[in-house]
Image (cartoon, rainbow, N blue to C red):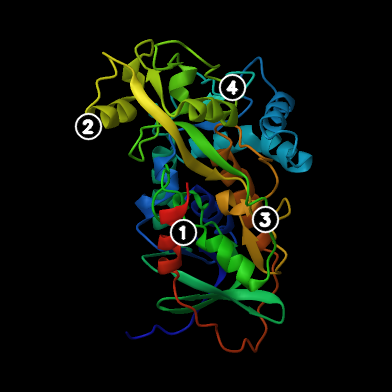
Amino acid sequence: MRRRQQDDCDLLVIGGGVAGFYAALCAATESDVVVLTKGPIRTTATYLAQGGVAAAVGADDKPALHAEDTISAGRGLSRPSAVSALASEAAARVADLVDLGVEFDPGLGLEGGHSRARVVHAGGAATGRQIAHALAERVVDHPRISVREGERALALWSTGSRCVGVTTDSGAITARATLLATGGAAALWQRTTNPLGAVGDGIAMAYRAGAGVADLEFVQFHPTALPGSGVLLSEALRGAGAVLLDDSGHRFTDELAPRDVVAREIGARGTALLDLRPVDRDRFPSVIGSLEDAGFDPAVEPVPVSPAAHYTMGGVVTDLDGRTELPGLYAAGECACTGVHGANRLASNSLLECLVFGRRAALASVAEPELPVRLGTPPVAAPAEKVTSAVRRSLW
């Protein structure tokens, strides 16, 4: 294979979901940005995100209430300063999405763990897809952003205790700042709602390069996935009136309790049934279509559900501006650990986290100094698909 010449940029973004694309757009007003994605840009976990974006924009709501709900769902282990940043900047980030062309549905949704209806949705349960599509269009058209699809990052490149870029399967890229936006690791489990590429490779790269990681034991299991598939039945369905039933047809839990509570209740029963008959199913065409494709008619009878690995709360340790313990290296989104989620993520805080901390990391990266004249030789590393495959077969 012919190797490309070494390239350089101001900001290198590894990952093509909401965190990576939004950060690239925020930085591109002052920086030349390269976005690296190991697969097509429309196969990230963002495109599968059915939940919305939580923001205290209702007349009966305020950021302090959003922060209280986030800390409560996180079992008191959330970092208060990170929660404050998330909740206080949420409304501005939603406004940014509107300016970028995202068309949100009318009204606000109520989801598990929220004390107010504060979740904005687009296309019913297709919020992640619509946000990602809008961002991708802007990124691809931006004159200062270069997107490289199908190029896999193999190892971070550091010299003099500073990250200076990355080695890929096509060569090496140097950058004044490198931002990891590689997602989580929930695809390591046999039952998962994640795309197969979400195996924590960015977290592993950061750890090998000397950056700290934390809270990796905190993995959220979404309560309502279709057994034997990766089809997720959105929290918004329960917010719209869907009811959880046991084998005898009896309701057994509060459908809008935090996800860890509902997942344990279902796990104790093995499976449960989600009754969608009380829901206006026309509001959720993508979910209903997936169920019908799987052979179910939710208008006639309840649908079986069980928990599946969904979200990684821990990751690469960062400050509130995405800086890791390795100078020059930033992280945002699911691969980062700001401490905002504690032990359990509040519903619809994930896309919001990508926006808030992706932007903060992008703005901070602009101040990174020029690279040293002498960088040394980039590292050589091979992908770890064999290890990943072995772990995936055993984890449940």
Q: In terms of sequence position, does the residue under pointer 2 or pointer 3 come before the other?
A: 2
Find disc 2 in the rendering and name its residue.
293
Whole-number angstrom distance, CA of label 3 to CA of label 1 = 29 Å
Q: In terms of sequence position, does the residue under pointer 2 or pointer 1 come before the other?
A: 2
Find disc 3 in the rendering and name its residue.
322
The nearer-to-camera label among 2 and 1 is 1
Q: Position of residue 152 (x, y in %)?
A: 42, 68
User: Quick one: label 3, few (<14), some, or many (20+) residues within 10 Å?
Assistant: many
SS at circle 4? loop
The answer, for residue 31, to whether it is visible in the render is no
The nearer-to-camera label among 1 and 4 is 1
Say which residue appears at 63% left-offset and 78% top-offset.
158
The answer, for residue 253, to whether it is visible in the render is yes
- Picture quadrant of residue 340: top right
Say which residue appears at 44% left-offset and 39% top-offset.
49
Find disc 4 in the rendering and name its residue.
257
Whole-number angstrom distance, CA of label 2 to CA of label 1 = 30 Å
SS at circle 2? helix
The amino acid sitting under disc 2 is Asp
Find disc 1 in the rendering and name its residue.
391
SS at circle 3? loop
Q: In terms of sequence position, does the residue under pointer 3 or pointer 1 come before the other?
A: 3
